[in-house]
């Protein structure tokens, strides 16, 4: 299972899409999208085909994103049921608004200054 990647430059950011193609059907079993800004990268979505959930596909996509952007602040707004999953990758909750949680993973340089938070 290879992860395909494409980038599209916009005026204020660069959109990066990660895709894991289905090996049989002409579709994707997992897709993630991030937006690169000057000093931060925001995870917009990580989506896995419902028939393929629980097989580590979302984890594979998030590991790739964390690896690609280890030197940047990574942010995500997510649902409470995914909070622990993101924490496994070094994200920390910054605030909750309604039924959404905003989380951040500091860049490697800052993580090492504050006691070496989990590196994945």
Image (cartoon, grey):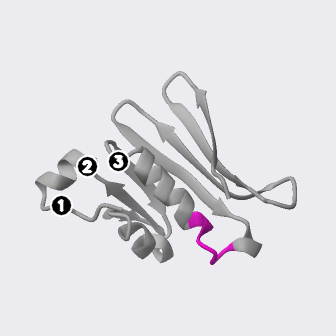
Farthest top residue in view: 11
Q: Which residues are magenta?
A: 53-58
Report which residue position mark 2 lands on.
108
Q: Position of residue 51 (x, y in %)?
A: 76, 74
Q: Position of residue 118 (x, y in %)?
A: 27, 65
Quarter-wise, where is residue 47 in the image? bottom right
Q: Position of residue 94 (x, y in %)?
A: 30, 60
Q: Secondary structure at mark 1?
A: loop
Residue 10: within the magenta?
A: no
Between marks 2 and 1, how big is the CA–CA gap?
A: 9 Å
Residue 70: give its label: 3
Residue for point 87% across, 59% down: 25
The answer to which of marks 2 and 1 sits earlier in the sequence is 2
Report which residue position mark 1 lands on.
116
Residue 86 against residue 109 in the figure, above or below = below
As rendered, which of 61 and 45 lies closer to the eye? 61
| Main secondary structure type of the part rendered in magenta | loop
- Asked if the residue under mark 3 is in contact with the one under mark 2, i.e. CB atoms within 8 Å, the reply is yes
């Amino acid at each position: 299972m290879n992860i395909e990647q494409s980038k599209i430059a916009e005026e204020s950011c660069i959109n990066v899409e990660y895709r894991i193609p289905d090996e049989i059907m002409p579709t994707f079993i997992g897709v993630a999208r991030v937006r690169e800004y000057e000093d931060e990268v925001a995870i917009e979505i990580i989506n896995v085909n419902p028939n393929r959930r629980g097989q580590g596909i979302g984890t594979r996509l998030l590991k790739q994103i964390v690896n690609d952007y280890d030197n940047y602040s990574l942010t995500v707004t997510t649902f409470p049921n995914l909070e622990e999953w993101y924490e496994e990758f070094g994200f920390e909750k910054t605030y909750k608004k309604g039924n959404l949680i905003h989380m951040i993973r500091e860049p490697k340089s800052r993580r090492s200054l504050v006691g070496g938070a989990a590196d994945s």
